Image (tube, grey):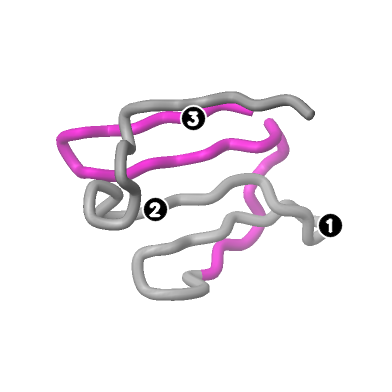
Amino acid sequence: MKVNYDREVDILYIKLTDAAIEESDEEKPGFVIDYDANGFVVGIEIMNASKSVSKPNTVELAIA
């Protein structure tokens, strides 16, 4: 998994796999879900991230 935050365009992207993106759906305004050919989630894009996420430039990992 990779997380990328681009300050210039204020977009946070969470890449879950390296699979090719086959389809993208904007589930809610500003939230795009990318899918592979089998319908599995490849990534999540959050536009205007600084308005939706409290700290878009900080990542915290927790393993249970």
* Mark 1 lies on residue: 38
Residue found 68% across the figure and 31% down from its top: 18
The label number, if any, that marks residue 3 in the structure image: 3
Badge 2 element: strand
Residue found 23% across the figure and 44% down from its top: 10
Which segment is the magenta one? 1-25
Query: Residue type at mark 2?
Result: Ile
Q: Quadrant of the C terminus?
A: top right
In this picture, residue 59 sits left or right of residue 9:
right
Q: Residue furthest left?
A: 8
Query: Residue type at mark 3?
Result: Val
Q: Position of residue 29 (x, y in %)?
A: 36, 73
In this picture, residue 25 sits left or right of residue 19:
left
Q: Earlier in the sequence, mark 1 or mark 3?
A: 3
Q: CA distance from mark 3 to mark 2?
A: 11 Å
Q: Residue 39 falls in which quadrant of the image? A: bottom right
* Mark 2 lies on residue: 46
Q: Position of residue 22 (x, y in %)?
A: 66, 55
Q: Residue furthest right?
A: 38
Q: Position of residue 37 (x, y in %)?
A: 78, 55
